[in-house]
Image (cartoon, rainbow, N blue to C red):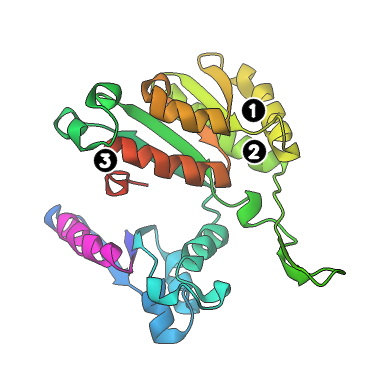
Amino acid sequence: MKIAVLPGDGIGAEIVVEAIKVLQALDLKLELEQAPVGGTAYAQTGDPLPPQTLALAKAADAILFGAVGDPRYDNIERAKRPEQAILGLRKALGLFANLRPATVHPELADASTIRADVVAGLDILIVRELTGDIYFGQPRGMRTNAAGDREGFDTMHYSEPEIRRIAHAGFKAALKRGRKLCSVDKANVLETSQLWREVVSSMASEYPEVTLSHMYVDNAAMQLIRNPKQFDVIVTGNLFGDILSDEASMLTGSIGMLPS
């Protein structure tokens, strides 16, 4: 098996070194090849995702990815910022589903910023769509309007096939767990969320063993703090999932406790 090792920046590079030690200790037949990504790659090549790094990722059987981000590059052109590397990898490789578990082990319950009795025994999974939504929708940009004022605009977009494939991932994950799936959207305001809810609801009959519920994203954000153990699997779009998964990380005490 060929593994592309992309350490990235900061803590990413540190933890990948230790992860490699674990892989080597298992004495598996692995071929590891390393390449720069993120801020490290930008410093070397002027590109956060160099062509050779992307080619290595495409040729590999798996990717061991650390993390990207460097405050030194916060004010450079957006397309060159370190975080653009992960967006580019997701799009180029069709990595549409992010599975993010949030688990609180009894020994670490006091590490959470929430009361230990609220989070003790927590075991939820957030299934986030990664290649659609407002992060990738077109058109987007900045312009000056007729009044001479600058304005920025983005496009939130989802197609039915995109929703169906991430919903399938959510339902299948729920089948392997507690058989409860909560679909999070903003269907009372957004057209994309109305389509999302319609499509997910239409698929429930394909998974009769799973109990499907729906929740608006603002309520979901509140419920994750108020009563997080009511959730088993959450399926949601790119933007909402980005926010909710980071919120869930604080239930465990640190975002470093959430694998992905």
What residue is pinned by disc 3? 253
Q: CA distance from mark 3 to mark 2?
A: 31 Å
Q: Are marks 2 and 1 in contact (CB under 8 Å)?
A: yes
Crowd class of label 1 (few under 14; some 14 to 19; many from 20; radius 10 Å)? many
The tag earlier along the polypeptide, 2 or 1, is: 2
The tag earlier along the polypeptide, 3 or 1, is: 1
- Residue 149: x %, y % from top left: 77, 69
In terms of depth relative to the viewer, which is nearer, 112 or 192? 112
Which kind of residue does numbered mark 1 sit on? Val
The tag earlier along the polypeptide, 3 or 2, is: 2
Does 25 appear above or below 146?
Answer: above
Instruction: Give residue 124's quadrant in the image.
Output: top left
- Please state, as top left, top right, bottom left or bottom right, where the N terminus lies in the image: bottom left
Mark in front: 3 vs 1:
3
Q: Would you say residue 234 is visible in this rendering? A: no
Which kind of residue does numbered mark 2 sit on? Ile
Q: Residue at x 49, y 47 (%)?
A: 242
Q: Residue at x 67, y 28 (%)?
A: 197
What residue is pinned by disc 2? 163
Q: Would you say residue 60 is visible in this rendering? A: yes
Mark in front: 3 vs 2:
3
SS for callout 2: helix
In terms of depth relative to the viewer, which is nearer, 23 or 170? 170
Q: Main secondary structure of the magenta part?
A: helix
- Write down the region rendered in magenta: 6-24
Q: Residue at x 39, y 65 (%)?
A: 68
What residue is pinned by disc 1? 200
